[in-house]
Amino acid sequence: MIKEAFQYVIGLAQKEIKEIGGQNYATGQLHLIPQPTVSTLKVRSLSGLVEYLKEEFDQTNKVLIHIESPTSVRVYSQNNQDMNRNEWLHASAIIPDFRFDNFYDAESFNIKLQSVFVQNEDRDIMLKVVGNIQEENVSTTGDDGVSQKATIRTGVATVSDVKVPNPVLAAPYRTFTEVEQPESNFIFRMQNGPRCALFEADGGAWVHEAMDNISDYLANELQELIEADKVSIIA
């Protein structure tokens, strides 16, 4: 049994090339030995990616920057002989947590608006509504299916009804902080408690705007390398 096993192994090593019908065939199965590829360097910002490329620390040929999402950008080498690429670097954005389509209590929602959203007019309106809402009067909130009306404090002892805007235009932090955060429409809703939520209402259009912003940023920061035909950018 052992002898037969050794003969089988020896037979595997004795490969020949035979020509049949004008084509070359190997008598045994051949396995390609792939060229080695590097381990990927990971960074958390676009500025780190830019610094790495400007140093030209690893690259000897032209590289490809692939903007694959608002939070992920990868740097690749050209194909090697095996048609594989080195992934030199992967930049992934640090994004603060905000759960869209989920209701927050008023205090948590207030904090999230101030810490996770870029300041603009509609954000400030939501802050005014959420920060001054009368908890004991939330049950009187009016709703016509599109906009809502809530009772809020307007002074020390007075209250008034305020129409809640819908949709609201807001810019949460959803991409790299080096680029402008895209504004998009959200549905702002309230429940008894009081509880508040934002629902995305732009069909994902912000994704393309964010990727365009990343592309513009990299094109500006890496202009010399692009003009020297050392860098290409795709999204």
Image (cartoon, rainbow, N blue to C red):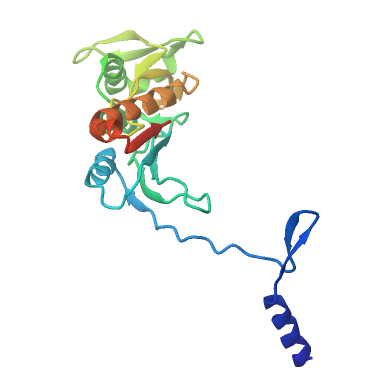
Which sits in the foreground, 144 or 230?
230
- Eyeballing the image, is 64 above or below 126? below
Residue 117 x/y as whole percent: 30, 27
Residue 51 x/y as whole percent: 23, 43
Residue 31 x/y as whole percent: 63, 64
Q: Quadrant of the C terminus?
A: top left
Which sits in the foreground, 94 or 106?
94
- Eyeballing the image, is 49 above or below 144? below
Q: Quadrant of the N terminus?
A: bottom right
In terms of image quadrants, where is residue 138?
top left
In terms of image quadrants, where is residue 156?
top left
Q: Residue at x 29, y 15 (%)?
A: 125
- Eyeballing the image, is 211 above or below 58? above
User: Is residue 29 visible from the viewing direction of this image?
Assistant: yes
Q: Residue at x 42, y 32 (%)?
A: 234
- Eyeballing the image, is 143 above or below 193? above
Which residue is farthest left?
156
Count of picture labels: 0
Which sits in the foreground, 235 or 96?
235
User: Is residue 192 visible from the viewing direction of this image?
Assistant: no
Which sits in the foreground, 70 or 121?
70
Residue 90 x/y as whole percent: 37, 46
Q: Residue at x 39, y 39 (%)?
A: 64
In terms of image quadrants, where is residue 21?
bottom right
Q: Residue at x 40, y 46 (%)?
A: 77
